Image (tube, rainbow, N blue to C red):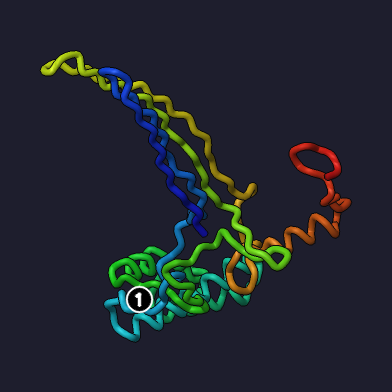
Amino acid sequence: MKEEYFYYLKAQKEIGKHIVSISALGSHVNYGVRRDRQKIETYNTEYAVNLYKGSDDLYRQLSAFNVASNIQRDRPTDTEARLALEQLAQSYGWGSLNEDGTYTIDRNIYANLASQNDFIDTVGVITQGERYNNHWGSLNDGIKNESVRQYHKPIFSVRDFWAISDRVYLSNVVYYSSGRGGGTSRSPGLGFGDYDENQQDNFQASYLENTVGSFFPPIDTRIDSIKKRVQ
């Protein structure tokens, strides 16, 4: 999404030994911004996999450990998930066995191996492409972007070129510039659960949550949020 136009206007007139010109130029810009830096596998999973420089066996170990770690992280009170992760780490020798029979995982081993071999786990990741922008989504059959930047800063100038004599010239310029602009962003920012199945901002769900209502009374969409009255 990008809207932009440029303009330049000039008027000039010779008055006696003076050449007076008035000019105006500027550009209006309105475009979407990608504020959030995504992981490389989000843009291109194939490229991320090709960065890996270790063995196939090590890749399978790193991937399996990463999956098990994510499961255990999402289910911190699940004993089975914890034991499964510990058993996996023990089979790889990534930790130490305690006197009471429990196993302490040394996550630094995993981190070092992943770093040394440029391992990037792509399990379950869907390639979105290099132009992926997570800040836009669909709303009421239209497209909406929550991260937009716009500005307009015209410059006006008046120039006087005075031929005092055949050898002496004097040029004076007065200019004025003013502008306005800014950006928009969602508050609070995007988080887990704010995306649709295509990994785009789920504006429709947010809209329905506020207009239909759930825990709180719905918002009256007829009320202008700026003027604070019914449109």
**Left or right position of 215 against 2:** right
Residue 176 in the image: above or below residue 115: above
Quarter of image, res 56? bottom left
Residue 77 visible in the current orientation: yes
- Residue furthest front as drawn: 16
- 165 to 46, vertically: above or below: above
Residue holding disc 1: 47
Pick the quarter of the image with the C terminus: top right
Q: Which residue is at 34% across, 81% downward?
A: 58
Above-or-below relation of 8 to 76: above
Observer-nearest of 62 and 2: 2
Check the image and name the residue furthest to the top: 164
- Tell which residue pokes out farthest to the left in this image: 167
Residue type at the position of mark 1: Tyr
Note whether residue 193 is visible: no
> Residue 13, position in %: x, y?
35, 27
Percent coordinates x, y for residue 160 in the rendering: 31, 21
In the structure shown, which secondary structural element does the residue marked by tag 1 occupy?
A: helix
Q: Residue at x 59, y 66 (%)?
A: 200
Q: Quadrant of residue 207?
A: bottom right
| Residue furthest right as drawn | 217
Which of 228 and 109 lies nearest the eye of the viewer? 228
| Mark 1 crowd level (few <14, some 14–19, many ≥20, 10 Å Cα) | few
Total numbered badges shown on the rendered structure: 1
Which of the two residues, 62 or 108, is positioned nearer the viewer here? Answer: 62
Residue 185: image x %, image y %? 59, 48
Residue 171 at x, y percent in the picture: 25, 20
